[in-house]
Image: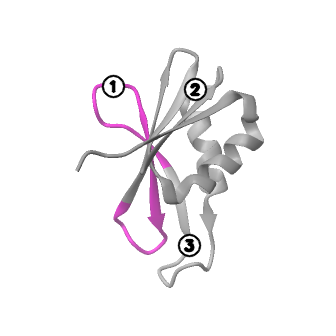
């Protein structure tokens, strides 16, 4: 299942993405070193950011989520449902329950 988080905020996507990334730093959880989530500017023509997972000793990054703004809402999209706690905890703490919506979708096979 794929999740989409909608955060009602005047913050820009970079700030919201950094809130999630700051929460997701794991030390000593893997023999390849510290595992962190990093925010990178998207390379396409649209204005968006990518949350990516990175091991300290590995150069390859894994895709975790897209982050972009639409109207007065920041969207964190294409999130695997295994990572729901990694998103909900920091978003609830910063933005509150009433400002967050979550939509679950099933990807087409």
| Residue at 28% across, 32% down | 44
Badge 1 marks a residue whose secondary structure is loop
Q: Mark 3, residues whose alpha carbon is within 10 Å: few (<14), some, or many (≥20)?
A: some
Q: Along the polypeptide, which appears first: circle 1 or circle 3? A: 3
Viewer-closest of 53 and 107: 107
| Residue at 64% across, 52% down | 22
* 43 in relation to 21, above or below: above
Residue span colored magenta: 39-61
Spot the residue most to the bottom: 31
* Residue 37, percent from left and from top: 53, 56
Q: Is residue 50 magenta?
A: yes
Give the CA separation, mark 2 to mark 3: 28 Å
Labelled disc at residue 34 = 3
61 left or right of 102 in image: left
Give the CA separation, mark 1 to mark 2: 14 Å
Q: Mark 1 — residue?
A: 46
Q: Mark 2, residues whose alpha carbon is within 10 Å: few (<14), some, or many (≥20)?
A: some
Is there a contact, CB below 8 Å, between mark 1 and mark 2? no
* 15 in relation to 53, above or below: above
* Residue 102, percent from left and from top: 56, 37
Q: Mark 2 — residue?
A: 12
Viewer-closest of 78 and 94: 78
| Residue at 61% across, 58% down | 24
Give the CA separation, mark 1 to mark 3: 31 Å
19 left or right of 61 in image: right
* 93 in relation to 11, above or below: below
Q: Along the polypeptide, which appears first: circle 2 or circle 3? A: 2
| Residue at 36% across, 67% down | 59
Labelled disc at residue 101 = none
Viewer-closest of 40 and 63: 63
Badge 2 marks a residue whose secondary structure is loop
Badge 3 marks a residue whose secondary structure is loop
């Amino acid at each position: 299942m794929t999740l989409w988080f909608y955060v009602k905020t005047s913050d820009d996507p970079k700030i919201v993405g950094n809130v999630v990334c700051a929460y997701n730093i794991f030390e000593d959880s893997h023999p390849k070193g510290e595992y962190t989530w990093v925010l990178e500017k998207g390379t396409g023509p649209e204005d968006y950011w990518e949350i990516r997972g990175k091991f300290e000793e590995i150069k390859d990054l894994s895709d975790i989520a897209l982050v972009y703004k639409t109207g007065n809402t920041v969207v964190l999209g294409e999130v695997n449902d295994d990572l729901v706690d990694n998103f909900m905890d920091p978003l609830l703490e910063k933005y509150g329950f009433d400002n967050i919506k979550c939509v679950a979708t099933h990807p087409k096979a």
